[in-house]
Each structure stands twice: as structure tokens, then as C-alpha cells.
Image (cartoon, rainbow, N blue to C red):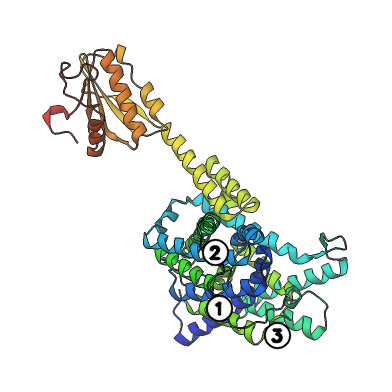
Amino acid sequence: MQDISLLARIRIEVLAGLTVSLALVPEAVAFAFVAGVEPLVGLYAAFIVGLITSLTGGRPGMISGATGALAVVMVTLVKDHGIEFLFITVILMGIIQIAVGLLRQGKLIRMVPYPVMLGFVNGLAIVIFLAQLESFKIEGPDGHEQWLAFGDLAVMLGLVAVTMVVIYVLPRFTRRFPAALAGIVVVSAVVIFGGIDTTTVGDLSSISGGLPTFGVPDVPFTFETLRIIVPFAFILAGIGLIESLLTSSLIDGLTETKGQNDRECVAQGTANVVTGFFGGMGGCAMIGQSMINIKSGARWRLSGIVAAILLLVYILSVSSLIERIPIAALVGVMFVVVIGTFSWSSLRIIRKVPVSDAIVMVIVSAVTVATDLAIAVVVGVIVSALVFAWNTARSIYVEISADSTPTRRVYTLHGQLFFASVTSFKDLFHPPHDPAEVVIDFRHSRVWDHSGIEAIVSVAQRYARAGKQLHLLHLSENCQRILNNANAIVDSDPAVDPSYRVTVSELGGSEGH
């Protein structure tokens, strides 16, 4: 981050927060509609979650609020059981997220491979783009959505284009004013002073309201209520943390800084507990608004705090002004976010990376668009893990050591022994054709799981049935302990146990490990 004066940094943060706050309004209203609740429920969530996570979160510069990924899960709960059940579910969701952070499990995000991250980013860009298309539609006479009439559509597209041009051109002249905010201001002025008839924020719903008030959700505190809310709470907690931690990782890369994942989990959870008691729908990190914030130059917590406070100001006092902002201006800002979010480099490298990585990227992007971000990431991690297991399993082999003699053969094992490679491991040895004494040296290998232990036992049994002596070298202490517990390692004297004759030792008389 370049060295700038304190006043300049504060100015950047405040203007970035103003830009984000304007973009938050239609998003919060839209996601409230998706969840089947009143717009103020979404706006209160954006204010409370945004403020608390900005103050206490582990990733400065990240913006949180009501999101579509959570809203699509909430809709069934609200429809079947009512809004009060949503509030109590959001509270439980927050408690789960706090527990994840306190147990220091935020590090699990490291398990997400880079191809999954690329697929996630590209899929999210597509989802954001598709979400903006709803602004070009209107409810028809038959109750179904249809595209705007040609004239209205042309006006809408023209205003979107003007917004995008301002955003791309302004930085060539000055970076002292956020380009996204400039685009919103210019297009709003054109619409208001030009008397152009187009959809505005106020056409979606009024955002006027009072301060959120504290209240315990009005639900029966019974096991039946718990049975209803627990599944939803775990799903929402998982989606919220995955989206938040992936967004945090993305910002880490853009800013070349490091966030604190466990702290972010606790902050997200605390925010959701509070918003549940104050009539909000809950939330998590918003990648679109976070990208607007970061690309506007924000790096501190101040921008998120400003955005949240301004959102409350809009609700309380200046809703009539905010409601006059044309939707086209906000759509233009989001289209620029889409272009900036999509990893265009992935299209250039897709033919250069392994086919499996390219497939993972495409799968994650497709699942993100078809379902939601959390499912897409889980699917991507599973596919990546299976590909890794398959490739690793194919890399196990043995070499016959130079220490071998006509009466003793020493096999040096290379590769990893685990569930996917046990079949290949067993096929490497042919007891009837080996001499009376056989050694398997594990110095270049590692046994990872119980399947690998069982494979060793199986090979030992085969050598025992063939009347051969088997030695295992350089096994880890943990592996030796498990084999001992399984009674698979015994004294080399056949009289002790006629079934197995396996010895863990070192050649040359040194102690095995």
C-alpha cells in the first residue's frame, strides 16, 4: 500500500464507505424479497452485520451484510414456519460460527485448492452478472417476468453504459474520488435533472424506518423448535463461513496482506447473534461490495464502519433521496465488479494446467451458478481430493536394493501408502517367488491411514503362508504402535505365532523407528 497522508487515507476510506453504502441498499432489499421478508429486515441485517464485522472482524476492508446465498436457504424456513423462526435460527447460526472460531477451525479454508478458488471466483462473477439481469425485467400481465419494452430497455442499457464509462475513464484523470461513486452521482444527476423515466431504488420498496429494536424471537422454546432450526442453522453457518473466508482469502491476494480467519469467524457469529435479536435476517461477507470497497482504495476498517452507519442514516432520515438513485447506476457498478472479479487469466491458462485442474474449475463455476457457493466449494474440494488420491495412488512402486542377496531380498518402497494405493501396494509383492527372507524398507514412503496398515498386514500374511520371513524397516513409531495393537508384529520365532512372522527392525542392528 502506497504511503499517503492520514487525512488522504481517511478521505479514501470515507468515500469508499459512501460508495459501498449506496450499493448495499438495493442488494439488501432484493435479498430480503428473496428470503420472503420485509425490506427493513434485510437493511437492518446489512447495518448490524456490516458494523460489527467491520469493528471486530479479522479482515479489514471486507464488507458483510445480507447475501443471496443465505437468502435462498432462508426462504423455505420463513415460508413454512414464519419470520420469528428465522430470527432464532440466525441466533443459533451465529453461536455455531462463534464456536468454529473459538475452536480455531478457520484454518480449514486452507483445504480449498487454487483451482477451486478460481472456479469460485468465476462462478461468483457469473452469479452477480445474472442477478443484475433481473433489473432489466418487469412483471407482465400474466404475473410472469418479461423483459422491459424496447424503449425502456434502451434507456436502461444507456444509463448502465454511462455509469461504466465514468468508472473506467475517471481514474485516468484523478484517483482522489472513487470512480464507482462518481458513476452513481453522474447518472443520478442525468436522470433527475433530465427527467428520464427509469426504475429507481424507491420503485423496489421504501427504505424508510426507525432504529432496530431488541426482542427475543417469539417462538416456543421446545425440542420441536430445536428440531426445526438446527439443520437450517448449520447450513446457514457453513455457507456464511465458507463465503466469508473465501472472500477474505481473495482480499488477502489483492492487498498482499493476511487476515485472521478465526477472528473473522467469531465476528461473523457475533454479528449474526446480535442481528437475530434485533430483527435482522443475518448475513456474511459480500464479495461484490468487498470488491467495490477494495478497488475504491479502502484498506482500513473505517470504510466498512462508514458504510454501515450511512445505511442507518438512509433508513432514518434521507431515504427519500436514496430512493431516487436509478437502478441502472447500481447495475453499472456491479457490471464493473463482475468484470473485475472474473479471473480472465484462467481462460488463458486452462489449456496449460493439468486437465483435472481445468475440470475442477469448470465444475465449481457450474455448481456455483446452479446451486450456491458453499455446495460448489464442497464439491470442488471433494473432486480435487479424489483427483489427488488417484494420482498419488498411481505413484507407488518398489526398487530392489543393492543390499539384496540370493537368500534375502530388500525392497525399497516409494510413494504413499493409503486407501487408494493399497491394491497397487499388494500387487508389488509375490511371496512364492521371493527368497526365504524379505525386507520392505519404508524410508521413502509413508503409511497414512488404517487401510495402509491393513495392506501391510495382508502382505505379511501372504509371506507367512509362503513360509517366508518378512522384515519392515523405517516404519514410523505411530505405524509400529498400530501394528502392535493389531498383533501384526511379533517375534521372528514361528513358535511364538504360526500365523505371522513379521519383524520391525533396522538392518545392521540399529533400532527401528
Image check: 228 left or right of 165? left
Q: CA distance from mark 3 to mark 1?
A: 17 Å
Nearer the observer, 485 or 326: 485
Q: Decide: is 300 above or below 348.
A: below
Q: Residue at x 46, y 82 (%)?
A: 4
Return the residue at label 2.
Answer: 220
In the drawing, what numbered circle is on residue 417?
Answer: none
Q: Amino acid at mark 2?
A: Pro
Q: Residue at x 60, y 65 (%)?
A: 67
Give the percent coordinates (x, y) of residue 189: 74, 84
Image quadrant in which you'd find residue 70: bottom right
In the drawing, what numbered circle is on residue 321?
Answer: 3
Q: Residue at x 44, y 37 (%)?
A: 389
Q: Amino acid at mark 3?
A: Leu
Q: Residue at x 64, y 53 (%)?
A: 369
Give the percent coordinates (x, y) of residue 296: 56, 75
Classify mark 1: helix, strand or loop.
Answer: helix
Q: Which circle's residue, 3 or 2, is located before the other in the chain?
A: 2
Classify mark 2: helix, strand or loop.
Answer: loop
Q: CA distance from mark 3 to mark 2?
A: 41 Å
Give the percent coordinates (x, y) of residue 116: 52, 50
Which of labels 3 and 2 is toward the front?
Answer: 2
In the drawing, what numbered circle is on residue 308?
Answer: 1
Disc 1 residue crowd, few under 14, some 14–19, many 20+, Cα 10 Å? many
